[in-house]
């Protein structure tokens, strides 16, 4: 790894350490909020986090800091990475007027409450005016941030550096083939698997998860597993990275696979080079690359017959009802394919179709080719065509996700990048043999060398090319699905 040698960049990294420390504290406060914070603390906690965020912003926008970044002459890849990442941060803090950020915060706070109630009542019209405001806000945001070809590009770039409509269109060009593949694959599976209804002992499942993650390579000296309503991963620094799991009492694959998924996110952060510690590039580079790591472990490694083979004995010890099922039963349970209305319930075959739908609608909304009032109808038709199911009410359709209420327009495509790049790594890095041989430490070493250790030194598309020899190519995903679900 390159060393930081340029004096101005050394000075920037020194100043950045204050931002890094504030972010460390913000993450820890955020983790606590989702896990152990007493219920009445949220207002006070919100105030504290808001003030810390303001401090972060004031360091980024300090004229001296900005001028150091703008005048820096980076000498190597790490230095170039640092300047690239800082320029992106400064862009978001300086291009969006304060009043705009405040307006967005007010609108999304209200929208979240309205969305929650509208979803409960399955009443889209209740949410519609809020969503109209949000679409309008996000179009203005795109104008503030600037773009070359398409206003949606400006929003996509927030979550995945360099992502554009053009690239998304290439990525989703395989959607019709995936839809066909899905319709053929689902014929091979029952509508329901009996293991979905088997209740489990939470204490035993927790132990199973800990032993599985230990074998896969989770470093418990730098990490923890806790419980929260929605599983997530959060990194404080390089030496404190935490994941959460949710235990629902039955259908054990949900907790187990979610844990393996978060493990993938966590190890990405744990494996970043110590040389990058407390610098602006000590972080996973993008949502898409991050998601490729979680999905690689969850879907490619975890939902494989070899994974079931490796952990079969431990599974039976923790979950005695598995004695009545053979290895193939368990594998079929982990890879069950059936049409789902809800994105987060979707199997890996149809998942990208759920994302394609959201991408298409977001793009049309931002272009102005689609009115918010038309969303439910368009959503339902699309689902029918791609997946073969039609929501009977909006809570099972257009109201299901929180993202739009949060004004996170442009986020969804990163999930598709994750699924697709995971398959590309599987193919291009010859992972098949290693997965068959359950050589998890070798798999981890390869991912670390090719991806993890670099943090944000390279932009996501360049990192993907360096890691796999090719830019993102959706055909690998197609062949991965075909092999796994049709052969
Ligand atoms: Mg994830």
Image (cartoon, grey):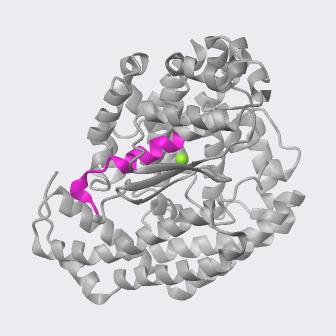
Instruction: Kindly indicate the quadrant of the structure image that contains residue 6.
Output: bottom left
Residue 58 in picture, x, y percent from top left:
39, 85
Would residue 335 be visible to someone looking at this image? no
Residue 468 in picture, x, y percent from top left:
31, 35
Foreground of the two, 157 or 343 = 343
Quadrant occupied by the C terminus: top right
Please determine whether, in this image, residue 232 is positioned above or below residue 373: above
Q: Determine whether, in the image, residue 123 is placed left or right of residue 310.
A: right
Main SS of the magenta part reads helix
- Residue drawn at x 77%, y 65% is 115
Residue 375 in picture, x, y percent from top left:
77, 56
- Residue drawn at x 32%, y 56% is 456
- Whether residue 271 appears in magenta in the rendering, the answer is yes
Magenta stretch? Answer: 261-277
- Numbered circles on residues, count: 0
- Residue drawn at x 40%, y 58% is 161
Instruction: Kindly indicate the quadrant of the structure image that contains residue 220.
Output: top left
Residue 459 in picture, x, y percent from top left:
32, 54
Foreground of the two, 332 or 317 = 317
- Whether residue 255 appears in magenta in the rendering, the answer is no
Foreground of the two, 479 or 143 = 479
Q: Determine whether, in the image, residue 140 is placed left or right of residue 270.
A: right
Would residue 376 be visible to someone looking at this image? yes
């Amino acid at each position: 790894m390159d060393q930081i040698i340029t004096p101005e960049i050394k000075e920037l990294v020194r100043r950045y350490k204050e931002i890094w420390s504030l972010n460390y504290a913000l993450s820890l406060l955020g983790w606590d909020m989702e896990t152990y914070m007493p219920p009445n603390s949220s207002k006070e906690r919100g105030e504290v986090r808001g003030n810390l965020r303001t401090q972060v912003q004031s360091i980024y926008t300090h004229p001296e800091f900005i001028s150091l970044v703008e005048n820096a002459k980076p000498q190597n890849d790490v230095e170039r990475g640092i300047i690239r990442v800082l320029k992106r941060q400064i862009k978001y803090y300086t291009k969006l007027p304060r009043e705009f950020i405040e307006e967005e915060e007010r609108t999304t706070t209200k929208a979240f409450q309205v969305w929650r109630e509208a979803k409960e009542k399955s009443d889209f019209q209740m949410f519609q005016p809020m969503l109209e405001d949000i679409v309008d806000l996000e179009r203005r945001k795109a104008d503030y941030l600037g773009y070359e070809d398409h206003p949606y590009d400006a929003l996509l770039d927030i979550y995945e550096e360099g992502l554009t409509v053009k690239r998304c269109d290439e990525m989703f060009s395989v959607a019709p083939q995936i839809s066909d593949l899905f319709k053929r694959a689902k014929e091979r599976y029952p509508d329901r698997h009996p293991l979905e209804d088997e209740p489990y002992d939470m204490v035993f499942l927790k132990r199973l998860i800990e032993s599985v993650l230990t074998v896969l390579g989770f470093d418990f000296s730098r990490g923890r597993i806790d419980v929260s309503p929605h599983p997530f991963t959060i990194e404080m620094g390089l030496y404190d990275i935490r994941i959460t799991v949710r235990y629902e009492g039955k259908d054990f694959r949900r907790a187990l696979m979610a844990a393996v998924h978060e493990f993938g996110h966590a190890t990405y952060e744990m494996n970043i080079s110590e040389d990058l510690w407390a610098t602006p590039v000590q972080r996973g580079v993008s949502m898409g690359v991050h998601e490729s790591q979680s999905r690689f472990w969850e879907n490619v490694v975890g939902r494989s017959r070899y994974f079931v083979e490796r952990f079969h004995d431990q599974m039976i010890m923790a979950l005695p009802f598995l004695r009545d099922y053979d290895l193939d039963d368990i594998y079929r349970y982990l890879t069950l394919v059936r049409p789902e209305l809800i994105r987060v319930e979707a199997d890996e075959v149809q998942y990208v179709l759920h994302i394609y739908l959201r991408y298409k609608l977001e793009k049309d909304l931002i272009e102005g080719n689609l009115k918010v009032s038309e969303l439910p109808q368009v959503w339902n038709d699309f689902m029918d065509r791609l997946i073969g199911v039609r929501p009977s009410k909006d809570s099972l359709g257009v109201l299901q996700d929180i993202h739009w209420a949060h004004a996170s327009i442009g986020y969804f495509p990163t999930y598709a990048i994750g699924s697709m790049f995971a398959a590309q790594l599987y193919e291009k890095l010859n992972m098949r043999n290693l997965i068959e041989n359950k050589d998890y430490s070798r798999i981890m070493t390869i991912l670390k060398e090719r991806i993890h250790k670099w943090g944000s030194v390279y932009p996501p598309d360049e990192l993907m090319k360096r890691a796999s020899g090719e830019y993102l190519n959706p055909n690998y995903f197609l062949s991965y699905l075909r092999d796994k679900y049709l052969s």
